[in-house]
Image: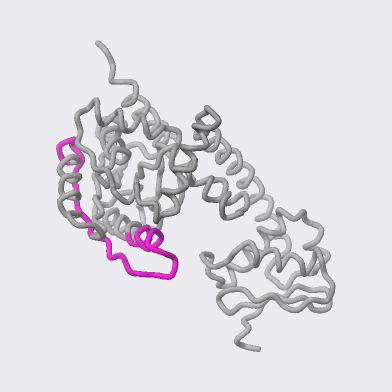
Amino acid sequence: MTGPPRAEQACRDALRACLSGEGLQSQHLLVACSGGPDSVALALAAAFVVPRLGGTVGASVVDHRLQPGSETVAQQAAQTCSELGLSPVRVDVAEVAPGSTGPEDAARTARFAALRRGAAAQGAVAVLLGHTRDDQAEQVLLGLLRGSGGRSLSGMPPARAFGHTDHPRRPALRLLRPFLGVSRRATVQACQTAGLPTWADPHNRDAEFTRVRVREVLTDLEAGLGQDLRPALARTADLLRADGEALDQISDRAYDELGSPPWPVEAVLAHPAAVRTRLWRRMALEAGVPGSSLAAVHLRAVDALVSDWHGQGAVDLPGHRRVHREDGVIWLRDRRGG
């Protein structure tokens, strides 16, 4: 008996490895399906793999209501998931609120909120997203464009916490990206050979969005070099993530040794710059500085209070916080209190 087509097998293998690695056999999972080939291929793989691991799988189709006909697209995606055997399948409407961070971030925030609601309604312990190796490569390039550090260049994590469940005995909700090692071409081929309908999001061709322009630049760069750069970029993300996790562990130990701020300058300066940056970040976050507004420029300015001290003034951080050096000690205070 012949097995499944190669592309479909690659999707199955990636999902099986992810779920086994996370210890999520015999659990109820939720596939986030947009109707595009990546998420439909994920639904296809999940319909085969999850029951064989002893679990169950449903789907959430998020309708952003940002394009004409989005309801029809959502219903088609939901029908495809149901026909594959996923259950329950629900369409969740995302309330996209305009914001200062742009339409992409606003849609992402609304989508994740809808997925959390869907997971809670179904009792799922993890939400599965169909991001591919191509998406990871584009994420690394976006980080390079922003001049970001290793945290950004490490790309999207394959697994992370995604909130809490409402049941004391149920594991915390997880967000999984099992296809980060699978090419976009493979997901398209898997859908085609299975005869599954998919939807091409016109936003993926709209040059108004930075990610679309990055995708075009990446394609041009590969054509000019005669080389597929996506595997190398995704591999770079994996390596940087591993390095970052090691540095995070070292920084956590250093933070515990320092105790709660204020901190003596000499004690902080004893750590290398990569560790100090993480110390400043954690100090700021635990003091209530919003992480979405905390940038590398803030952390560099704070670090200069110990690494390049020449009597400069305090450093203002988002969230009305201020860091300053006084009598050989680093303080963080609420600047509204004077």
Q: Does the magenta stretch include residue 217?
A: no
Q: Tell me: 182 left or right of 307.
A: left
Residue 254, image quadrant: bottom right
Horizontally, residue 305 falls left or right of residue 118, namely right
Residue displayed at 68% across by 59% down: 277
Structure colour scheme: one colour
Question: Where 319 falls versus 40 (above or below)?
Answer: below
Is residue 108 one of those drawn in magenta? yes
Q: Where is residue 316 in the image (x, y as percent from the top left)?
A: 65, 76
Question: Looking at the image, how many numbered discs can be counted on the residues?
Answer: 0
Q: Report the front residue among 239 and 195.
A: 195
Vertically, is 176 above or below 167? above
Q: Which one is in front, 104 or 13?
A: 104
On screen, residue 303 versus residue 245, left or right, reads: right
Name the image quarter holding residue 135: top left
| Position in image of residue 223 (x %, y %) | 49, 32
Residue pictured at 28% horizontal, 47% vertical = 201
Split into 4 quadrants, where in the image is the C terminus? Answer: bottom right
Residue 165: x %, y % from top left: 35, 57
| 78 over 118 or under it: above or below | above
For this rendering, which residue is in front, 170 or 150?
150
Residue 128 is drawn in which quadrant?
Answer: top left
Residue 130 on image: x %, y %: 35, 41
Q: In which quarter of the image is the N terminus?
A: top left
Answer left or right for 196 relative to 212.
Answer: left
Residue ID at (69%, 75%): 315
Q: Give the range drawn in magenta.
A: 82-110
Residue farthest to the bottom?
338
Q: In this view, does 190 lie above or below 130?
A: above
The residue positioned 26% from the left and 60% from the top of the image is 66
